[in-house]
Image (spheres, helix red, strand yellow):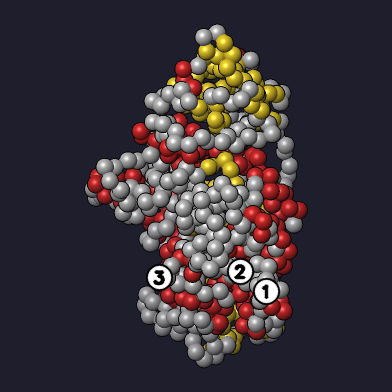
Amino acid sequence: MKIKETILVIIFTCVTLISNSQVINRVAPPFWWTEMKNPELQIMLYGDNISEYNIQIDKNELLVGIDKIENPNYVFLNLSIPKNLQATKLKISLEKDGELIETIHYELKKRIKSKNQHQGFDNSDVVYLLMPDRFSNGNVNNDSSPDMREKVNRENPDGRHGGDIQGIINHMDYLKNLGVTSVWINPLLENNQEKYTYHGYAITDFYKIDPRYGNNEQYKELVNKAHQKELKIIKDVVLNHCGINHWWMDDLPSEDWIHQFPEFTRSNFRSSVITDPYASEYDFNLQQNGWFDVNMPDLNQKNEYLSNYLIQNSIWWIEYAGIDGIRLDTQPYSDKDMVAEWAKKIYDEYPDFTILGEAWLQKIPITAYWQKSSSNFDDYSSNIPVITDFPLFNAINQAFSEEQSWTEGMSRLYYVLAQDFVYEKAMNTLVFLDNHDVTRIYSSLNKDLNKLKLAIAFQLTTRGIPSVYYGTEILMEGYAHEAHGKMRKDFPGGWPGDKINCFDETGRNIDQNEIFNYYKNILDWRKSKPVIHTGNLTHFVPENNIYVYFRHNENDCVMIILNNNESEQVIETGRFNEILSGYTSGIDIISKSELKNLNKISCGKKSAMIIELRK
């Protein structure tokens, strides 16, 4: 294996290369910390024939051993860091034939502990998902980079458009005003590919923010400024694959670093085979080892060095930037035992942290398998507490466009929730109307504002953690069957010179403001309502295309009515007495109207009511 081009090492201020870097080209992690609960640290050193050198560390008592592997251009230093060790710099020297060839100083930093970091997110939060390249361009000077293969081209729906970290920082007040509390950002790491780099999922350097977004320090600034505004930051993490132009692809540490085939072999994308008791080995291997795309090599997490590299990388970003949560991309595609170990080691260091796993599966029992401590046939636990709820997403996108039958229309919502017993904790599910991979909800519901309002009201009051996709609050459109770039359009007003600015009320049309304010009203109310966050859910079988459910605890009770009919309905409430008994009136937080008689409730056509009950 030969290096095709000189690889420039990314040097943080804490890693100082002394001499002319004759051998060492990369160090990962670039630095670490003392006082970590896990004392073990494995440092990857990369350089031409580095394994031929005698490697010395001035604090030799920290060195457990040096691993040399298949490729002589890699060595792994295994360290054990005592908990009482003070911040220091290790002098790592390379010698050959008794001559000092090169020295680097590797920094072990002191941990900076803050109550605002690593907060985690839960049912009291509402997550806002944004795609950074399509949200806002706060710095036009970094739209293209001389070191990056793809340059900015806003005319190309699948090209880079220039959104960046500064753009997110600039619009934090918008997010705060909307009423969300956490921001999930699609991957910001370097994607140095020829094309289709805007989505961020073909990573070419796991330790570097893409320069077209900013840099590592600016990402840290983003997190700090979000915390100042009481917003949490969720990092999108990819373990399953990397980009074809990742720096190690020209010189793999070992042949089994990635899954390799005689010719390109794509995954069958059938994650159900992992839990299928009748699955063939052929189907299982294709799902686990096949590539996502020709530009996305499938990483082999069974390789212990790669596994450790990925685990340390996630912990490094958590500690370095102070993020509050992780969304794990394509959870079932990575080796499940490695994922469980990855999550465990993160929680060992950060017990208040939150990990959300993406399990894009259609059936509820198969989805529940991937949540921590579900009652699985093989006793497997992913150690990941929160899971995406794709079955409920599918039900929402159908329920409000169908007439009710035994299984269709509003019954779809009922039947999904009626199967919550298979989850370890059904409250720990992410409830979403759309996201970056699917048709936008406004398009899915045929651009019907009333249907959208019903979906929003349900999403923000049912069990689980709501997630809002950027632009849903201003009626952005897009279809999954089109090119994904068209489904991920720029947020209007995020670019200098945009004729329309939907970040501002005056730039939104009447319908956009109607939906924005509908969201904002419920979101602001929801913030201070533990009964919605953690209260019990009691629902009643839908009748006459009307779904009624309650969220209740010892102190409060909220009644939600979803009328999916094309006409106003008067609801006789006698069958709800087991919950309503003792309550005499209520306030509908949507219309702000007072209900003085709960025996009969009138609900407008295709509309929702969220009623705070009073005794």
Q: Is residue 302 left or right of residue 537?
A: left
Question: Disc 3 marks which amino acid?
Answer: His
Residue underneath mark 2: 491
Question: Disc 1 marks which amino acid?
Answer: Asn
Measured as percent of width and height from the top left, residue 112 is found at 72, 37
Q: Around disc 2, counting alpha carbons within 10 Å, would you say few (fewer than 14), some (14 to 19), or many (20 or more)? A: many
* 3D distance between C-alphas at marks 1 and 2: 8 Å
Question: Disc 2 marks which amino acid?
Answer: Phe
Residue underneath mark 1: 501
Could you say whether the residue bearing mark 2 is in a helix, strand or loop? loop
Measured as percent of width and height from the top left, residue 28 is found at 56, 32
Could you say whether the residue bearing mark 3 is in a helix, strand or loop? loop
Measured as percent of width and height from the top left, residue 294 is found at 37, 51
Residue at (54, 56) in percent of width and height: 151
Q: Is residue 95 above or below residue 7?
A: above
* 3D distance between C-alphas at marks 3 and 2: 20 Å
Q: Is residue 111 left or right of residue 416?
A: right
Could you say whether the residue bearing mark 1 is in a helix, strand or loop? loop
Q: Choose the circle earlier in sequence order: 3 or 2.
A: 3
Give the quarter of the image for residue 612. bottom right
Q: Choose the circle earlier in sequence order: 1 or 2.
A: 2
- Asked if the residues shown at circle 1 and circle 2 are in contact, with their CB atoms under 8 angstroms apart, the answer is no
Q: Choose the circle earlier in sequence order: 1 or 3.
A: 3
* 3D distance between C-alphas at marks 1 and 3: 27 Å
Give the quarter of the image for residue 72. top left
Instruction: Looking at this view, name the residue that lies furthest to the right.
Output: 228
Is residue 482 visible in the rendered image? The answer is yes
Residue at (62, 20) in percent of width and height: 103
Name the image quarter holding the C terminus. bottom right
Residue underneath mark 3: 481
Residue at (67, 74) in percent of width and height: 501
